[in-house]
């Protein structure tokens, strides 16, 4: 027995020792790619020494003698901290993910090959001005200098992920930076999928009911929508989903999770300091690390500081000493889907305005790891590229013998957006900033500007010109051969809506409707917000003058205008009615829930139970209203549409008809459905979080999940690479925490303000900013998540251009010197 015990002890000890050695070895290999920020490196590609001063938050402050040297150093810094992220963005845009990940990313690669964003980016390089070309060249040289350092200096392949997905890394090129801008446009695009969904819904519902479930933003001049079946023949009414891939590395955002943002500014008449203020918080999918990276560049025109995206040599939201700028998604309708008839006698041709025309056709080979390569036939019409039927559910609205193509401004091969960004960084006032916006093509944004004396807001981006006789005004797909459905160029920049020096002293945008002009000057029928704008209007008008602190307060506001407006409608006949019910019964649980909601002020606070009860009720209510009419198509409405709920309960244009369940014999009323939905919600809450309503926490359901895009689902590793936090806010609060809408975790916070900035031109160095994770993309770095808790608590970092402050608390200074 003693001998057996000794051998068991030896075996156990050996296993422990082997485990420790394995962990040590893994750590050693992973840690090799942690950069040394306090170093001197001799590099080729710069004319004079450059300093990269890392402050205590790891924000690089870059000082060089020429702009080209500064952009070189930015490329070096981006690659040091975010090399894997940059490689993944480039591979996604090129349609080359399957080389690393095999068949599971094939649909994503197929879509990107058909869109051919990379070719458009390559050709757009020649359209940049000389200064922008020089900046792009220098930035690429900086990235490549770090790649050379990784290869020659045993830097652990540059990132821990490279050990798991090792593949040759091609040198960075200017086109790689240009294509990432186009990839961002794809992530922000809401119109393509919305056109398809609107067409599918119109096949199943009468026009007035389509207007209920897909409502247009309030305002005058709404135009009736024709039935899709009246425009395109032979489309099946009930089409099965083609299940587009949103699960793994797809750049296509699921419906409701496209771009969003807040941005506003106050002029001197509305500022307590008699200078201007600007706040901006762009909303994108939460990832670990964040898509945002903070940086300061000391350029020949002065210092600029703010948020960058690794791979792009621009401060996309930030400030200089003289000008601040912020961006929000404009929701400009810059996309149209076309149904293209294929010649039944020659599949290489499609119908054009004057007869059959040849497709532009070429083949593209997609290399797939652990599987045969796939040869994709790429086709293009004069309207744009032909897309595969599984992309955007296009196969569900395509009649036999046809294909679908797309016209989209981001496909431009003469895209000067990068030059616009460079000129914006060099601008010293609002007027110069507005002029810089003229060159912006895609993705379209609302640009908010503030210098020391003025504020302005302007839609930037190419605005397609449509024929007044366009059959659907661009809201649903139409035949591509009809001349009236085709684009007629773009409007001049002067037609883009904007306001400079507003009479009220304040400008802002929450993705709301910004202009009410008749088609075709309308800008869009689809807008990203009809709710947050109401809370923003209240907060900004509640004060005669504003301060940096009041702008921060508004940016972090978690009161839901939607909850305050919808709950009185939903519960109008339920509040304090009915007989007392015994404890433990559904009726008693409903009474408790209604009692809590009756006293609630609409604040989506993470520590309170009411937001969870409200959100679950609203979700169950919409599902009960639409499930019988739409069937499986109801799954496409993963987020609640507040205007739909309001239309139903106010019975606008007969919308209360949604409350009657078609398949049942009784005639249900809206209070009936509201009551049943509340019971549904309480059952779900009880099964998921427990039956003690008073002890519920919204934050338990509304966790912000910053997931590593590749390793986030990997067992054990995901404990180290994912960042999960309890958060306040919700779908319709100014501090927006957009929920996933997925069945398993419907209220998980997956889309929020990864960057926040508030710029005060009375004292510019008192300006502040923050990102949602940290600067480093290396999960072993202390800077991987060191900003995350500050972000969650609503705290900020100082945003100073004072070099002395950066040096005083520097965690390291990297000196790049010219190679002899």
Image (cartoon, grey):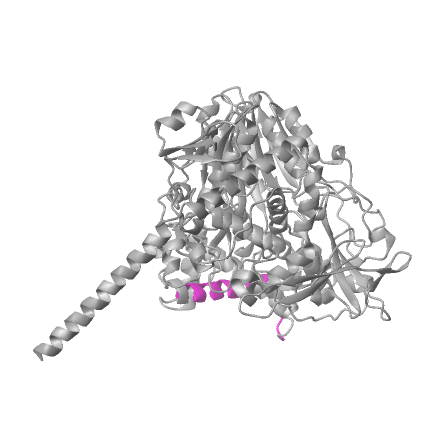
In this view, 274 is above or below 625: above
- Work out which residue is located at the far front of the displayed protein and give it: 820
Tell me, yes or no, if residue 153 can be seen here. Answer: yes
x and y, in percent, of residue 130 in the image:
67, 31
- State which quarter of the image contains the N terminus: bottom left
Location of residue 248 with respect to 600 vertically, above or below:
below
Does residue 75 appear to the left or right of 500 in the view shown? Answer: left
Q: Main secondary structure of the magenta part?
A: helix
- Residue 60, quarter of picture: top left
Tell me where residue 785 appears, x and y as whole percent: 39, 46
Front residue (pair 770, 730) = 770
Position of residue 754 measured from the top left corner of the image (x, y, whole percent): 49, 44
748 within the magenta span: no
Quarter assignment of residue 594:
bottom left
x then y, percent, for residue 393? 66, 64
Q: Does residue 501 appear anywhere in the picture?
A: no
Residue located farthest toward the bottom when viewing the structure as drawn: 1
For residue 114, which quarter of the picture? bottom right
Front-lying residue, 188 or 793: 188
Q: Could you tell me which residue is drawn at 58 percent across and 54 percent down?
A: 92
Is 277 in front, or is 673? 277
Q: Which residues are magenta?
A: 665-686
């Amino acid at each position: 027995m003693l001998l057996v015990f000794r051998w068991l002890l030896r075996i156990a000890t050996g296993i422990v020792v082997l485990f420790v050695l394995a962990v040590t070895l893994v750590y050693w290999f992973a840690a090799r790619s942690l950069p040394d920020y306090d170093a001197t490196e001799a590099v080729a590609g710069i004319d004079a020494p450059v300093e990269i001063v890392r402050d205590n938050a790891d924000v690089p402050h870059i000082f060089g003698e020429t702009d080209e040297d500064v952009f070189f150093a930015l490329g070096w810094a981006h690659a040091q901290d975010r090399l894997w992220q940059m490689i993944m963005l480039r591979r996604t845009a090129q349609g080359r993910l399957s080389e690393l990940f095999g068949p599971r990313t094939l649909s994503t690669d197929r879509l990107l090959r058909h869109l051919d964003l990379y070719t458009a980016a390559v050709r757009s390089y020649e359209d940049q001005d000389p200064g922008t070309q020089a900046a792009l060249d220098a930035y690429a040289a900086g990235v490549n200098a770090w790649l050379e350092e990784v290869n020659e200096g045993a830097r652990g392949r540059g990132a821990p992920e490279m050990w798991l997905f090792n593949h040759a890394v091609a040198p960075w090129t200017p086109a790689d930076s240009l294509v990432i801008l186009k990839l961002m446009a794809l992530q922000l695009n809401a119109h393509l999928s919305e056109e398809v969904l609107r067409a599918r819904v119109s096949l199943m519902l009468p026009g007035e009911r389509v207007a209920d479930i897909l409502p247009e933003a309030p305002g005058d001049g709404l135009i009736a929508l024709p039935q899709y079946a009246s425009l395109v023949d032979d489309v099946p009414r009930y089409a099965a989903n083609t299940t587009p891939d949103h699960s793994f590395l797809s750049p296509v955002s699921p419906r409701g999770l496209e771009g969003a943002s807040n941005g506003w500014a106050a002029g001197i008449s509305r500022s307590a300091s008699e200078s201007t203020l600007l706040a901006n918080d762009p909303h994108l999918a939460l990832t670990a690390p964040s898509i945002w990276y903070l940086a300061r560049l000391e350029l020949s025109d002065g210092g600029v500081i703010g948020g960058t995206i690794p791979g792009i040599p621009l401060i996309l939201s930030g400030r200089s000493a003289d000008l601040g700028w912020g961006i929000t998604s404009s929701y400009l309708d810059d996309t149209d889907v076309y149904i293209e008839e294929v010649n039944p006698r020659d599949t290489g041709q499609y119908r054009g305005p004057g007869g059959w025309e040849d497709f532009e056709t070429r083949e593209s080979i997609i290399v797939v790891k652990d599987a045969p390569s796939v040869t994709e036939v790429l086709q293009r019409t004069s309207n744009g590229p032909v897309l595969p039927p599984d992309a955007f559910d296009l196969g569900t609205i395509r009649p036999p013998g046809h294909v679908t193509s797309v016209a989209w401004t981001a496909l431009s091969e003469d895209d000067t957006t990068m030059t616009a960004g460079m000129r914006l960084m060099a601008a010293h006032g609002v007027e110069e900033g507005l002029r810089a916006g003229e060159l912006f093509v895609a993705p379209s944004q609302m640009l908010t500007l503030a210098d020391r004396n003025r504020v302005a807001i302007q839609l930037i981006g190419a605005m397609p010109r449509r024929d007044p006789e366009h059959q659907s005004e661009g809201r649903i797909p139409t035949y591509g051969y009809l001349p009236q459905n085709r684009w007629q160029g773009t409007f001049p920049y002067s037609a883009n809506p904007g306001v400079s020096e507003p009479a009220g002293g304040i400008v802002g945008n929450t993705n709301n409707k910004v202009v009410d002009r008749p088609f075709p000057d309308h800008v869009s029928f689809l807008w990203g917000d009809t709710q947050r704008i109401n809370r923003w209007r209240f907060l900004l008008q509640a004060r005669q003058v504003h301060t940096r602190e009041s702008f921060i307060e508004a940016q972090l506001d978690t009161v839901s205008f939607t909850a305050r407006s919808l709950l009185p409608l939903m519960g109008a006949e339920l509040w304090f009615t009915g007989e007392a019910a015994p404890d433990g019964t559904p009726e008693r649980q409903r009474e408790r829930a209604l009692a809590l909601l009756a006293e609630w002020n609409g604040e989506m606070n993470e520590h309170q139970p009411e937001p969870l009860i409200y959100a679950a009720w609203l979700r169950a209510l919409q599902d009960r209203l639409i499930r019988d009419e739409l069937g499986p198509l109801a799954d496409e409405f993963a987020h609640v549409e507040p205007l739909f709920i309001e239309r139903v309960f106010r019975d606008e244009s007969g919308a209360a008809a949604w409350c009657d369940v078609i398949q049942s014999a009784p005639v249900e009323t809206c209070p009936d459905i509201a009551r049943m939905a509340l019971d549904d919600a309480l059952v779900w809450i009880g099964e998921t979080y427990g039956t003690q309503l008073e002890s519920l926490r919204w934050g338990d359901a509304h966790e912000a999940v910053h997931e590593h895009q590749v390793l986030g689902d990997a067992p054990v590793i995901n404990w180290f690479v994912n960042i999960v936090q309890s958060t306040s806010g919700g779908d319709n609060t100014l501090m927006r925490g957009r929920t996933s809408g997925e069945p398993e975790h419907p209220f998980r916070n997956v889309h929020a303000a990864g960057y926040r900035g508030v710029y005060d031109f009375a004292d510019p160095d008192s300006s502040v900013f923050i990102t949602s994770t940290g600067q480093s993309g290396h999960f072993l770095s202390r800077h991987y998540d060191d900003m995350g808790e500050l972000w969650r608590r609503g705290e900020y970092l100082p945003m100073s251009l004072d070099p002395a402050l950066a040096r005083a608390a520097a965690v390291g200074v990297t000196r790049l010197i010219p190679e002899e």
